[in-house]
Amino acid sequence: MKRQNYFPVRMDGQPTWLTNYANALSIHAPDLSISPTDTGASIDDARWCAYGVGTWIATVRAFSPASTDALDAMLTGEGNSPMVLPTFTPPSLPNGAAPRKPGALTRIFAMVARIKKDPAYTEAMGTDLGIIGSEDAGHAVPKFTAVVQQIGGSQVVRLGFFKYAHEGVFMESRRNGGAWEFLGIDTESPYTDERPLLNPAAPEVREYRMSFWDKGTPNGDWTDVAKVTVSP
């Protein structure tokens, strides 16, 4: 199967990409001309794949040495008691994940192609979904979006970013026109700003900017500033 250039090559980065895709698609789907049924199916595919390349394969690999040891004992070991072979117990499915038909990742790639052809599709949406590939490399700054989300009883800001070929992004923020302050370094999109409001009873204007981060050092120019309002 051909891998798309926006999809992480390393398996350890794939669960994060798939989870982000599922979460971002649920946010942007209402703006696209894709049916709720197809949207839900793609989200389910992503959650199932994230389980497979995440906790399931990690558990399989952890079990493998025990099975090898048992086989060695079966063939060349010593002792008088009948052996009890180890049993593999798969990890529990996370909330929202369920088994899907084969070909889930292939279907996700097909859905991404549909999204990119949708009249409502924008580059900002693509950045948030993580579906802008390496053909866009060579940019002087990262690309990112800032979206306010309601989680539980409070609002947070979800920063979806594309780092191109760099290791990560270096983020700064300022609140209500104050001084710029270090927010964080992240190597996998998205980053969630969960800071409490300066005044719990008043809305707060937050501004964000990013630069590339490589080999432990921020580098390059700052992006344009993104501004959002977070409410109590």
Image (tube, helix red, strand yellow):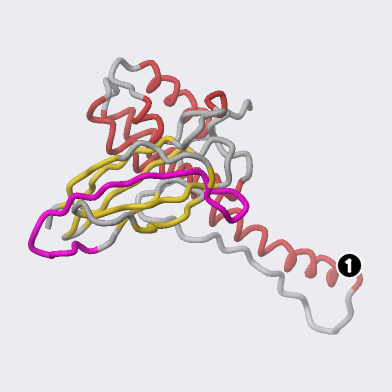
Camera-side residue of 90 and 197:
197
Q: Residue at x 54, y 45 (%)?
A: 219
Quarter of the view holding residue 223: top left
Camera-side residue of 157 and 229:
229
Check disc 1 and report the residue beneath it.
75
Span highlighted in magenta in the image: 196-218
Q: Is residue 207 magenta?
A: yes
Quarter of the view holding residue 180: bottom left
Q: Residue furthest right?
A: 76
Q: Residue at x 21, y 51 (%)?
A: 177
Lateral position of residue 199 relative to residue 70, left or right: left
Secondary structure under tag 1 reads helix
Q: Residue at x 17, y 47 (%)?
A: 229
Amino acid at circle 1? Leu
| Residue 65 image point, x, y percent | 75, 65
Q: Residue at x 13, y 64 (%)?
A: 199
Camera-side residue of 138 and 156:
138
| Residue 214 image point, x, y percent | 59, 48
Q: Is residue 168 magenta?
A: no
Q: Residue furthest bottom?
A: 80
Q: Assign the C terminus to one quadrant of the image.
A: bottom left
Circle 1 Cα neighbour tier, 10 Å, few/some/many (<14 / 14–19 / ≥20) = few
Lateral position of residue 42 relative to residue 205, left or right: right
| Residue 107 image point, x, y percent | 48, 28
